[in-house]
Image (cartoon, rainbow, N blue to C red):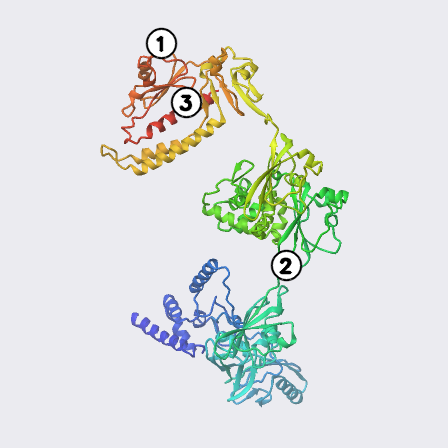
């Protein structure tokens, strides 16, 4: 049995090998198919896979009587599916690494991108009238009338058919139409009373040869109805070095026709796609000249050209230029006689240029048109319909913005807007300031400015805090695609654009005005390096602001921009265009105004315009006097002048105070003397009238306690907790410093003095505890002393101070390194040792000698600082006993004493507050 299977396998393999040779397209014989079918299924699959044979053919699922049908394509010629997937992944990686990489493809070859997986024919195509019948074709004859009969007559090798009633009939050289007419006439004459219906039956197969630069040249058996294009599809198409425009059909050594595949691909003309005959040779010569076309063209590709074809013919092959093309400035890269590339400028709108002959190797680039608008007005900011608008002669502000309610956003500032105007061909600008409210409603000629071509109009929001920035931040995230850590949901609480602008704008004030602060606020991170993500966001925001007036998405979202962000590209441009002999045309304002910052110096600007630009004065502004600082430069010296300005008179347009401004001027609007913002403190707990109390400057805790009605009968004043925000911030800063120092100490001390290795896990746990500490900001106060009127114990209040007055406490807490940290009921007369004993006494790693007490008022009693302090000292209600960690036990890290003390003290303070 084994020998039989082996011999069958050898025979089948021989058949497969014969089929896989250059004449592999020959249909296997029935004997080969039978041998293949007799093999086990696994052996059939192995042989088919090894020699690239379609099992459906050898398995007998396709018959010889069929003709070439729809072919099954693979992803790319010559690649397996796995290889194709790998190449696709590689291409995607390459594209991600270089998004600008583009490669022109050869035009027309993708028509044959697949190769046939089967050579089975079909016969469901209509037979053309000029079809020449021959040996192997079948003719169906239906007779009806006196007799009803049907015959299927096959044309023999001698070119005759054997008609039962009529005998042999020669049909050599007849077309199907001629055959039908001839048979119909014979039947009508020789068979009285019988009519006929004659159709073609099964068609013969023909053998053709495909030679030259085909993908798979060789001998093929195809349908007798096959045309040139069908034959090419059978052979897998044309190689990339083969010509698509000079496909030749040779019959008996003579050239029958030449087929230009471009006629079919570009014009749909298949008139030269003739039917083939048995023995025909389809020859594909090597490609002729090629021309590449790229740029603003509808179909960039590499095209094959014939002799005497011109540039216009090539452009037509590429389907013409795009609407955004500028064909006047196109160019051709061409090799000269010395083998060097040259550039030839061509105007593709000129007939003379179009008629230039194309040469092999030409690389035609169709340039794009400019993205700039001619004479357009750009409107951005707090308007209903930002965008580009037509300019016309005599156009004014109220022509572009006819109404306040219909054209301006509800948040628009009606007192401040800008017109940015180009003053020369280099793009240098000047700035005009106007009040939109007056320009629209009053048609004030000083405000309703005449517009010029390419003007840019910016309308600002009155209050930047009310702007919805979600869409703007989403756009930033989409464009900065490498930001992976932020999801769309996080945009609700993260202003990416503001963060990027803040990072980008670091040092901008210093560069323009020589300051590192504005309005008394230091620019954060002025010397700090940006993180990777911050840098990414900053770069994206910088690009966005640079294209503010040309980016459609940004123009649409410009009503979400803050005043400072809208002004940034203007101030940057003014800074860039300034020359060394002139001042930068920017000014600044700070102090009691709504929007402190840097502003462009508008034409004929005065103090009143600068105040309006800053959103006007705020409460507490001292209008009788402001200080204008001016830089005065001469040929060799520069000096600073301070000019006093009456702001109220300037806003009333008094010429003496409403002085003209110069570049680099800085106006400081002072605060009214003795002015204070609303300040308040809160009293909680056991007072008669707890609540929030407004305070004046200099008011003390004793004053507010008197307003609160004093203590209730259940108050425990000595355990009161006084919290101050400024103290809390200072404590938080010190804790951070200590954590950084402890981290360095752990990193540098691997072994203690006694040679033991530092326990890093415990050290890291303590460091984590330290970093998670929430500072309280407790300030020790003596309310009893304040209550009896001792001035030294009283203190002045600050905004947001809070006093907690607890109820009477009857407890004593023992914490730290004791066996059982716990809170015990207070018993009068019990000593420190007794309370320690109640908690099991100190642990082995506790520093018993440095035990201290946190008194109820927050003060600390240490052994070395109090003569009366001893282990037999009495404890008061509300006290907390702390047994600290032995620093020698903890590997001699010097900071650990401070760390444990901070942790314990903070825990005590938080516990006291949370209990109220």
| Residue at image location 49% in from the left, 25% down from the top | 724
**Res 769 seen here:** yes
* Crowd band around label 3 with a 10 angstrom C-alpha radius: few (<14), some (14–19), many (20+): many
Residue 307 drawn above or below residue 604: below
Q: Earlier in the sequence, mark 3 or mark 2?
A: 2
Which of the two marks, 1 or 2, is nearer to us in this view?
2
Instruction: Indicate left or right for 778 with 411 as reference.
Output: left
Give me the disc on residue 425. 2
Question: In terms of depth relative to the viewer, which is nearer, 427 or 192?
Answer: 427
Mark 3 secondary-structure assignment: helix
Residue 338 spot, x, y in % from top left? 48, 78
Give me the disc on residue 12. none
Residue corresponding to mark 3: 908
| Residue at image location 49% in from the left, 10% down from the top | 788
Question: In terms of depth relative to the viewer, which is nearer, 784 or 142?
Answer: 784
Residue 653 drawn above or below residue 347: above
Residue 647 spot, x, y in % from top left? 66, 34
Residue corresponding to mark 1: 829
Q: Earlier in the sequence, mark 3 or mark 1?
A: 1
The N terminus is located in which quarter?
bottom left
> Distance between the Cα atoms at labels 3 and 2?
72 Å
> Distance between the Cα atoms at labels 1 and 2?
94 Å
């Amino acid at each position: 049995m084994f020998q039989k299977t082996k011999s069958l396998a050898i025979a089948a393999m021989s058949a497969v090998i014969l089929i896989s040779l250059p004449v592999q397209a020959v249909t296997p014989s029935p004997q080969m198919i039978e041998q293949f079918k007799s093999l086990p299924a696994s052996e059939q699959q192995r042989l088919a896979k090894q020699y690239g044979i379609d099992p459906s053919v050898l398995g007998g699922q396709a018959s010889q009587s069929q003709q070439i049908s729809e072919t099954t394509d693979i992803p790319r010629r010559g690649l397996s599916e796995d290889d194709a997937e790998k190449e696709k992944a590689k291409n995607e990686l390459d594209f991600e690494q270089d998004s600008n990489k583009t490669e022109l493809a050869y035009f027309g070859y993708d028509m044959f991108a697949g190769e046939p997986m089967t050579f089975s024919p079909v016969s469901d195509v209509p037979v053309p009238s000029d079809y020449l019948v021959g040996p192997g074709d079948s003719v169906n004859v239906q007779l009806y009338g006196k007799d009803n009969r049907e015959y299927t007559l096959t044309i023999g090798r001698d070119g005759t058919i054997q008609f039962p009633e009529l005998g042999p009939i020669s049909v050599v050289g007849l077309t199907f139409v001629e055959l039908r007419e001839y048979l119909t006439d014979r039947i009508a004459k020789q068979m009285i009373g019988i009519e006929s219906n004659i159709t073609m039956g099964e068609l013969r197969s023909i053998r053709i040869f495909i030679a030259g630069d085909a993908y798979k040249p060789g001998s093929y058996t195809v349908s007798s109805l096959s045309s040139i294009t069908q034959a090419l599809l059978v052979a897998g198409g044309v190689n990339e070095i083969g010509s698509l425009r000079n496909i030749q059909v040779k019959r008996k050594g003579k050239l029958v026709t030449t087929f230009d595949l471009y006629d079919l691909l570009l014009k749909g003309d298949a008139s030269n796609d003739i039917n083939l005959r048995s023995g025909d040779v389809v020859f594909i010569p090597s490609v002729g000249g090629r021309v590449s076309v790229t740029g603003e063209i509808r179909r960039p590709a590499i095209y094959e050209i014939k002799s005497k074809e011109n540039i216009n013919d090539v452009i037509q092959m590429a389907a013409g230029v795009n609407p955004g093309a500028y064909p006047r400035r196109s160019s051709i890269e061409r090799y000269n006689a010395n083998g060097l590339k040259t550039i030839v400028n061509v105007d593709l709108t000129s007939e003379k240029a179009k008629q230039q002959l194309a040469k092999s190797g030409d690389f035609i680039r169709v340039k794009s048109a400019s993205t700039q608008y001619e004479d357009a007005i750009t409107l951005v900011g707090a308007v209903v319909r930002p965008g580009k608008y037509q300019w016309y002669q005599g156009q004014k502000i109220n022509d572009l913005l006819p109404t306040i309610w219909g054209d301006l956003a509800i948040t628009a500032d009606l007192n401040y807007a800008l017109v940015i105007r180009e003053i020369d061909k280099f793009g240098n600008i000047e700035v005009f300031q106007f009040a939109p409210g007056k320009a629209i409603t009053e048609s004030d000629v000083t405000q309703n400015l005449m517009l010029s071509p390419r003007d840019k109009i910016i309308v600002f929001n009155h209050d930047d805090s009310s702007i919805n920035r979600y869409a703007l931040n989403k756009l930033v995230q989409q464009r900065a695609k490498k930001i992976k850590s932020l999801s769309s949901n996080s945009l609700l609480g993260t202003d990416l654009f503001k963060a990027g602008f803040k990072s980008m704008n670091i040092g901008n004030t210093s560069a323009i005005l020589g300051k590192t602060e504005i309005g008394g606020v230091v620019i954060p991170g002025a010397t700090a390096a940006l993180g990777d993500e911050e840098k990414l966001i900053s770069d994206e925001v910088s690009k966005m602001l640079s294209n503010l007036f040309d980016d459609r998405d940004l123009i649409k979202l410009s009503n979400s921009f803050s005043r400072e962000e809208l002004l940034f590209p203007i101030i940057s441009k003014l800074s860039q265009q300034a020359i060394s002999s002139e001042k930068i045309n920017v000014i600044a304002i700070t102090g009691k105004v709504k929007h402190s910052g840097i502003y462009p110096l508008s034409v004929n600007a005065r103090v009143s315009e600068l105040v309006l630009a800053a959103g006007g004065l705020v409460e507490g502004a001292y209008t009788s006097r402001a200080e204008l600082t001016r830089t005065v430069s001469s040929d060799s010296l520069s000096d600073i002048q301070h000019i006093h300005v009456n702001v109220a008179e300037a806003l009333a347009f008094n010429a003496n105070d409403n002085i003209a401004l110069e570049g680099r001027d800085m106006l400081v609007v002072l605060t009214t003397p003795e002015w204070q913002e609303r300040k308040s403190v809160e009293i909680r707990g056991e007072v008669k009238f707890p609540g929030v109390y407004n305070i004046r400057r200099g008011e003390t805790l004793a004053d507010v306690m008197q307003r609160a009605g004093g203590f209730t009968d259940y108050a425990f004043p000595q355990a009161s907790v006084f919290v101050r925000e400024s103290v809390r911030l200072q404590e938080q800063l010190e804790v951070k410093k200590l954590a950084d120092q402890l981290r360095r100490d752990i990193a540098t001390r691997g072994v203690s003095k006694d040679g033991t290795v530092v326990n890093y896990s415990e050290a890291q746990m303590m460091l984590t505890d330290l970093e998670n500490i929430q500072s309280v900001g407790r300030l020790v106060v003596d309310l009893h002393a304040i209550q009896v009127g001792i001035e030294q114990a009283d203190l002045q209040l600050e905004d947001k101070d809070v006093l907690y007055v607890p109820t009477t406490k009857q407890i004593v807490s023992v914490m730290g390194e004791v066996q059982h940290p716990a809170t015990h009921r207070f018993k009068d007369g019990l000593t420190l040792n007794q309370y320690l004993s109640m908690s099991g006494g100190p642990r082995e790693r506790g520093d018993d000698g440095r035990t201290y007490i946190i008194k109820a008022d927050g003060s600390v009693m240490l052994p070395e600082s109090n003569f009366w302090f001893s282990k037999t000292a009495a404890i008061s209600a509300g006290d907390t006993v702390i047994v600290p960690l032995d620093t020698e036990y903890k590997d001699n890290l010097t900071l650990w004493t401070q760390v444990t003390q901070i942790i314990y003290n903070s825990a005590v303070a938080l516990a006291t507050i949370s209990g109220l």
